[in-house]
Amino acid sequence: EFSRVWTMPWACPHALARAVWAIVACADLAAVRTANAQLPALPSVPWQPGPDRYSVLVPGSKQPTLSLYPPGGIVGVATGSSLCSALRDPQDSRSWHFLELYDHMCPHCWYAVPIVTDVARAFHGHPSLRVKSLNCHVRSNAEACFFLEIISGAVDYPTFLLCPPRKGTPPHADEEAVRSLPHRAQGLLRRLKGSQRATFMQLLRCRRRYIEPHVRRGAEDPFLSARAVAEWVTASTGIRAIHAETLNQGADFTDRMVPNPRAAPGRPGWLRDDKAGSPGVPAWVPGQRWFDALRGFIALLHQGYRESRHQAAVDCAWYLARNFPVKGRELGQLAQMLRKQGPLAQPDAFRELLQSWARDTGIPDPLEGLSEVTKEASEEERYLTCSGSPCVMWTLMHITLTAVAARGLSGRTLLGDESLADGDQVAKTTGIREAMLFVKTFVENFLSCGRCKANFLRDYHSCAYGRCTSSDFRALPIWLWRVHNAVSIRVALRHKAQVDRRWPMYEDCPTCWRKELVMGGQSYERRLRPSTLSVEDLDAPFHTDRVFWHMVRTYIGVQRVAFELSDLSHDEQEEVQAVLERERAIAAGEPLPPPGSLAPAAHPTSTQAPPPGWPMRNLAIAIPALASGVLGLLCYHRCDVSRVAQMFGLVERTTRAPMIRTPQDEDDLGEDNDRLRGGDHPREEDPAAE
């Protein structure tokens, strides 16, 4: 095999031409990026937003907990159990406790890390104040966080609370505190028994909640202020900061790159979407994204359900039953179960119902079976295509809206559609406004990041990103695409990311980007503004009609859309054909179309000759360049010649599209190998195989 790989390029002009094209294309793209970016080289690894996470063993706990704060740091790491222990400790209960409730997957909780750290530094050494943090995404902390929400009136994260020292003897203090509780909290307390009641009573002191001054005035969200938080602590406790000089910095957004939403493509910011070492070759097929989206839906309901959000859970489950590509009958059963059960005051009862339904449906809990450590030691969801709950939330919404648009365009259900859509009436049953309302309902009720939610709702109600002008099905997923790109740009800004987080990457869809912008290195001059980005800003670098079909390809599979080509315009017919050709090229291991081309790359034949008059000097330069390129590829892939051969199409690659089911016995979500060995082509089994 080793000999075959090395001798074939010289015997086969096809492979040699492909190798030359690949090297020239890569060099051309690198030159364009260098000219546009003018930044030092970065490692080509998938960039993810968010600060470091730590596994912290809290005293008194048997298993470590997940935290945004390091062990032994100036900000204490608490669990629900350790917090209750501290509050009932006769010594510790004489102190004030500053407590941050957060979700480690919440972007504004990431921004709060330096704020809370500065506040802790400012009061460090004061004997009467303890600064602690509690990660409410961790399920073992869910009960304590729920009780603190009810007691303090907190809704989202991050939330800052103060727990004053205990006054008087415990029985008298408890009676006084209970009488002052809101009616809802008193009603819950009457239903609690045993250890739950004891936990609630221990947390009863933590009722003082910080409300940002700009929220009181209804102003737009500024960056959090460590000084404002410290002043609130002093006003509430009478304790003054010992090291006030630490309060001047706040969140570290200095020296950040200001992104230009109209600029040419920069360094790839979505490398995780592609196979390692194969830019433009998707790492995932739509079915794998569906699988993660449904698991994420379960996790988000598990964390976010409250009695007041019961109807939202019913509505979202029912909408997905009618519109998500798979598991429609099962999602409909969930909606009916919840409707019959009625609102549940305690989330634990809802979680038991949800877990029972998920097991019967065959959708595993994201905490189960996909972690290298035990469930108790991890407490973090593991997904195949995503790195956390924000990603799976976006994936769920993109899949759903793209499916609605695909059905709406054709007036037919998808091929293999498992939704409860009503056949030929599908375009009438789900409208554009109803789809947008689903997104609003889901974000408003099950997104834990308070400021993220407020920003989304502000943009939604102000008709930002073309929401109120989206009058056809093509515009529906494009509206959500704009929202997502705007959020990605802002997150990258605040994290000083030196990558381009606009989607899709140039490597994944060259034709989605405007040719004159990419090849000319032009930049439509308009810097990121402090308020919402405009439709013009976000659309400027792209052909949105091609972005739409790329979304269909990514989230649904073009070949699952049951339309007649005659239903489409001439331009759309060409775009669909180009997408299908790209799919076939990827499946066959052929070179992808060169930048700026809609057609697949031409296959050189053995009779083709070099252009006349090609100087011998250029040939003398090209041969060493080709040799060095091949050696470079071998080194990049650690001398894995089979990998290099695969890139040039010398080794046949097969692709498989997964069915939406639970992986068992090391099943990789693909079609059975026995069926493939029996001669069935994957496209005959799944028309959207990628």
Image: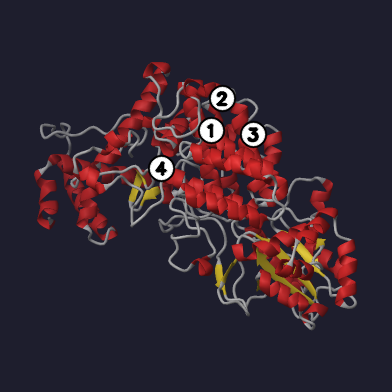
Tell me the CA gap for discs 2 and 4: 24 Å
Q: Is residue 312 left or right of residue 24?
A: right
Pointers 1 and 2 in contact (C-beta within 8 Å): yes
Q: Nearer the viewer, mark 1 or mark 4?
A: 1
Mark 2, other Cα within 10 Å: few <14 / some 14–19 / many ≥20: some
Q: Earlier in the sequence, mark 2 or mark 4?
A: 4
**Residue linked to disc 4:** 287
Q: Which mark is residue 322?
A: 1
Q: Earlier in the sequence, mark 1 or mark 2?
A: 1
Mark 1, other Cα within 10 Å: few <14 / some 14–19 / many ≥20: many
Tell me if residue 430 can be seen.
yes
Q: Is residue 196 left or right of residue 38?
A: right
Tell me the CA gap for discs 1 and 2: 9 Å
Mark 3, other Cα within 10 Å: few <14 / some 14–19 / many ≥20: some
User: Residue 265: x, y in percent?
Assistant: 46, 42
Q: Earlier in the sequence, mark 2 or mark 3?
A: 2
Q: Earlier in the sequence, mark 1 or mark 3?
A: 1
Q: Nearer the viewer, mark 1 or mark 3?
A: 1
Q: Is residue 590 above or below residue 229?
A: above
Q: Is residue 618 above or below residue 236?
A: above
Element type where label 4 sits in the image: helix
Q: Quadrant of the N terminus?
A: bottom left
**Residue furthest toward the top?**
566
In terms of image quadrants, where is residue 583? top left
**Residue linked to disc 2:** 429
* Numbered-mark total: 4
User: Residue 88: x, y in percent?
Assistant: 77, 77
Q: Earlier in the sequence, mark 3 or mark 4?
A: 4
**Residue linked to disc 3:** 437
